[in-house]
Image (cartoon, grey):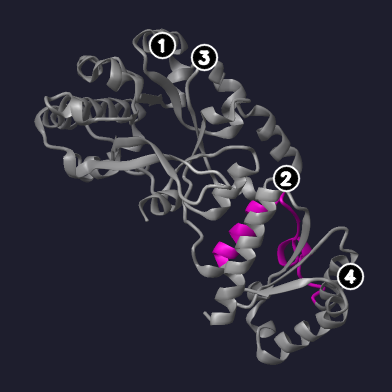
Amino acid sequence: MTAMGLTDAVELAALARDCVVSQTERRALIIRLSRLPTEFRGERHQRQLREALQPVLRATRTRVFELPGGDLVAVAAPPAPHLGEARAVMARLLPDFAPAEFLPELRLPLQSAALLAAIEEALGLAAGEAEADLSATGLPPPPEELDGAERALATADISPFLRATGVWRFGPEDEAPLRLWDELRAHLGDLARELLPGYALGAAPEAAHRFRAAAERRMLADLARPPRPRTLAALSLPLSLAAATSAEFFRLEHALGPVGRRGLLVCLPPADLLADPSGVEELGRFARLRGWTLGLDDAEPELFPVLAPRRVRHGVVRLRFRAALLAAPSRERAAIDAALPEARETIVVGGADTAGAIAWAWQRGITRFAGRMVEARGGA
């Protein structure tokens, strides 16, 4: 990675963010030389391709950024017809390669997230798919093994298997994120490997549901032990409906007291809302009566119309960010945007692991996040 490429990448990322903040329109042409086959990546071919662009771009007010790996990004104010000319020149030189893949054109700030994703890819920062908690391949645990695991969970110290992170507010104008909730959840994959080695809980949904509820009840029981509740401020708990209606939860909820309950956020999985909408509605009424917040956890954007977030009134909806959202066709993007809750302050984007995820949210007025990147910024 050259110093020149790194500097250009940082400057281009700043430009993309500035476009989001100021709503300044720009056009960008990405020339993905790094994706060309080996025979086109030699010094001679690269020089010829770059020289072919110079006449088109030299006489215009265009900034050309060189990213690590050799990709070029040309940015200009609209309407920027010369970027179309440059794209046509490259398409003639590379007739066997699809322009949409090798020569994407972007409109900023609308597609700033896609530009940031390209920068992250060039820097080697693109996040991979999140590790699945429970494997769906293999043999499900026999009933006696699952019973034994539940008994073990009832008395086990599961603190090594808990993940403590944050939910943050981070807007385009903010210098650093502001922590809104401390979030705690059990890592089911690690627990399953410890207590049910060799079995695949994901292959048995009912068993996975029981195992999750047992692990969460154990976590809740530990949180409710004095003097722990008095040390908890704003607390976010992603829970199954079974755990959120258990005796362990109600003991914790009572121990928090009125002040602690005002900072409590409980988010249920969408599957529980679909399976038992009346049970979720009843829990929502109880939450409003007691002064804490009920929400949805890990919801796919496309499912919002089905999930009917209005059933979790005045709550929070945690949207599961996926990299595919950046490259979705315009019609699909419009449908997702229309399905988002109008009260943007009720949306938390989970999986905010890249600048692309944050920019995607900012473009839609969303400023609440959970994920590795914002966590690192908040802890800096």
- Residue 209 lies, with reference to residue 200, above or below; the image says above
Disc 2: which residue: 329
Residue 130 horizontal/vertical position (percent): 42, 49
Helix, strand or loop at label 2? It is loop
Disc 4: which residue: 85
Residue 121 horizontal/vertical position (percent): 56, 64
Helix, strand or loop at label 1? It is helix
Q: Quick one: which residue is furthest to the left in this view?
A: 155
Q: Is residue 123 visible?
A: yes
Indicate the quadrant where residue 171 lies. top right
Q: Distance between the Cα atoms at labels 2 and 1? A: 39 Å
At 40% from the left edge and 24% from the top edge, which residue is drawn? 268
Range of the magenta residues?
94-121
Residue 27 horizontal/vertical position (percent): 79, 59
Tell me the amino acid under the disc marked 2: Pro
Tell me the amino acid under the disc marked 3: Arg
Q: Quick one: which residue is furthest to the bottom in this view?
A: 44
Disc 1: which residue: 288
- Residue 88 lies, with reference to residue 221, above or below; the image says below
> Given contact means CB atoms under 8 Å apart, are the residues at marks 2 and 4 in contact?
no
Helix, strand or loop at label 4? It is helix
At 64% from the left edge and 38% from the top edge, which residue is drawn? 364
User: Is 12 inside the magenta-drawn segment?
Assistant: no
Density class for disc 4 (Cα within 10 Å; few <14, some 14-19, many ≥20) is some
